Image (cartoon, rainbow, N blue to C red):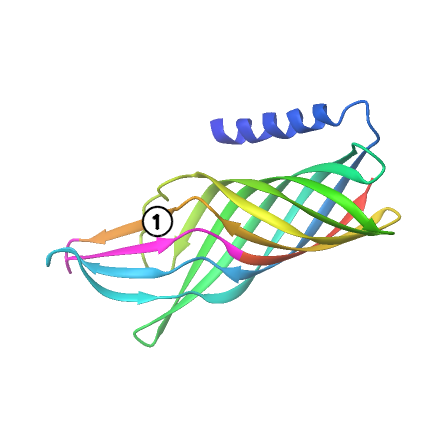
Amino acid sequence: MKNVLIFLILFNSCAMIAQNKRVNFGVKAGLNYGDNGKIEFTDITNSGENLLSENANDRVGYHIGVYLRGNITDNLYIKPELQYTQNNSSYEVNNSKLDYDIKKLDLPILVGVSVFGPLHVFGGPSLQYIVNNELDDVRLGDVKNEFTVGLQFGIGLQLGRLNADVRYERGLSENQAQSIDDNIGQSIRVDSRPNQFILSLGLDL
């Protein structure tokens, strides 16, 4: 709860930055396509020998949220967003599929510039708070860092009150969830950093 309050305070601070400028409030939703990082199986009884390492398969997730867009000049704006996101990945391990799901709150703080008519480009940091992470049939511990930082950049269109954009996101902070099974002497580590493309549709209210 403390971290959620921090997110709300940061979002409100960004709104205050845009105060006294022309500000638009809106709602947004969209799809994410990508993955998290590798899954690794380690033999903890044999000097940490790496038994298996598999990259994730891309999956589709989703997000919903709100945003503020404050114009700093006619061509430059700041756009903080607050959204709930679910990322999905899957792994092929010993002819079985394991699904890895992450639920998180995202706070991208984007700076954009108009380049031609309704077309604009943008980028900035994305603060992320991981609410929950689940791996099929495996009792994972909490991720190492619930609060992490990523980077987003992309291109968008503003058509009246409607806007659409496509962006790329990459988690920068190294972050893992881990499970240790003493019965078989193995640990499982899953990289929780997002690596994905995001398609969003928004509406200024």
Up the image or down, 79 lies above or below 175; here it is above
Residue placed under numbered mark 1 in the picture: 177
Magenta run includes residue 167 = no
Q: Residue at 44% across / 45% down in the picture?
A: 132
Q: Position of residue 108 (x, y in %)?
A: 61, 41
Residue 139 position, x and y percent, is 31, 52
Residue 1 in view in this figure? no
Q: Is residue 8 positioned above or below 74 on the image?
A: above
Q: Is residue 31 left or right of residue 201?
A: left
Report the amino acid beneath label 1.
Ala
* Residue name at image x 14 percent, y 57 percent: 183
The answer to whether any part of residue 156 appears in the image is yes
Nearest the viewer among 82 and 133 is 82
Q: Residue furthest left?
A: 46
Residue toward you, 105 or 159: 159
Q: Residue furthest front?
A: 115
Q: Which quadrant holds residue 112?
A: top right
Quarter holding the C terminus is top right
Measuring from the top left, give residue 34's x and y in whole percent.
Answer: 53, 62
Residue 93 image position (x, y, % from top left): 33, 71
* Residue 184 is a magenta residue: yes
The region drawn magenta spans 182-195
